[in-house]
Image (tube, rainbow, N blue to C red):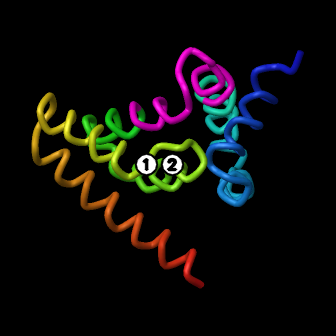
Amino acid sequence: MPDRFDTGMQVRRSVLGDAHVDRADAQATEFDRPFQDLITHAAWGTVWASDGISRRERSMLTLALLAAMGNWEEIPMHIRATARTGASPRDVLEAFQHVAIYCGVPKANHALKIAKQTYAEMHEEESR
């Protein structure tokens, strides 16, 4: 049975893509390597590896939570991940509508702006 770190790395690569994980790994230093190991083990090897809900649902929850907390920097990465998790733009819109009602319209509005920009970039990259 693989350990949580190995499982986390497999899930992380599956959700975020090899290029993203390779860039993050290449940028890690002695200072932040323990943090990278922590999120690989705990977030990806435990939470994202759970089969309790689908990756589509997990994407929607993650995006809603990021928007609700105002963690704008993480939203593009998780919008890009929807291409691998199966969460559609409609799913993302539904998640952000929940954010608007339960956490505030300005947060949802800003998250939608980021999502629109990221989807446009993804479309442009696909067109190349």
Asked if the magenta segment contains residue 34, the reply would be no
Residue 119 marker: none
Quadrant assignment for the C terminus: bottom right
Residue picked out by circle 2: 82
Instruction: Name the residue: 25% across, 55% down.
Output: 112
Q: Residues within 10 Å of mark 2 (few under 14, many from 20)?
A: many
Amino acid carrying label 1: it is Ser
Mark pair 2, 1: CA separation: 7 Å
Residue 88: image location, x then y, percent: 43, 48
Number of numbered discs overlaid on the protein picture: 2
SS at badge 2: helix
Q: For this view, does 19 lie left or right of residue 73?
A: right
Instruction: Name the residue: 63% across, 43% down.
Output: 15
Quadrant assignment for the N terminus: top right
Residue picked out by circle 1: 88
Q: Residues within 10 Å of mark 1 (few under 14, many from 20)?
A: some
Q: Quadrant of residue 14?
A: top right
In front of the other: 91 or 81: 91
**Above or below for 74 versus 42:** below
Most distant residue in the right direction: 1
Instruction: Name the residue: 25% across, 36% down.
Output: 68
Most distant residue in the bottom direction: 128
SS at badge 1: loop
Q: Give the magenta-colored segment's residue range.
A: 44-61
**Residue contact between numbered discs 2 and 1, judged by CB atoms under 8 Å:** yes
Q: Quadrant of residue 35?
A: top right
